[in-house]
Image (tube, grey):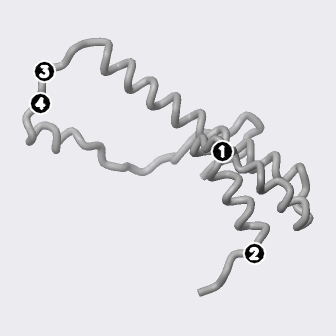
Amino acid sequence: MSQLHPSIFALVSLAANIASNHPKQGLCQVERLEGYGVSREQMNLVVEIARHIRDESAQILDTQFDAALAAPAPVPSPKERLAAIPIATAGACCTQTPSGQSCC
């Protein structure tokens, strides 16, 4: 099994910390990345994509929560709950970041 280069590992860790809203936000990775020669421009791109994924996720969850509170729905049967589970379909997995980068 091949290992990731330490700079890739640090970039992934930085992005995951930001996207997951971890309290430390991956700040410890910035110094490591600088030591590996990763440019601020590259770090900024990773941060932008991670923030976009985090914010998009929060917006979708908020919209679903607001919709659920808008009108009380009858309690569905177990069979109806199973039938309501969404099935993934073809299409874009996410929208673009403000600078036009794809997060997919």
- Verify CB contact (< 8 Å) between mark 2 and mark 1: no
| Residues packed near mark 3 inside 10 Å, few (<14), some (14 to 19) or many (20 plus) | few
Is 62 placed above or below 41 here? above
For marks 2 and 4, the one nearer the N-term is: 2
Of 79 and 16, which appears nearest the observer? 16
- Tell whether 61 sits left or right of 36: left
Report the disc number at residue 74: 3
Report the disc number at residue 18: 1
- Verify CB contact (< 8 Å) between mark 2 and mark 4: no
The mark closer to the camera, 3 or 2, is: 2
x, y percentage for residue 39?
91, 56
For marks 3 and 1, the one nearer the N-term is: 1
How far apart are labels 2 and 4 at the CA level?
49 Å
Q: Label 1 sits on what residue type? A: Ile
x, y percentage for residue 37?
92, 64
For marks 1 and 4, the one nearer the N-term is: 1
Instruction: State the residue position of label 2.
Output: 5
- Tell whether 7 sits left or right of 20: right
Q: Residue at x 77, y 38 (%)?
A: 99
- Verify CB contact (< 8 Å) between mark 4 and mark 3: yes
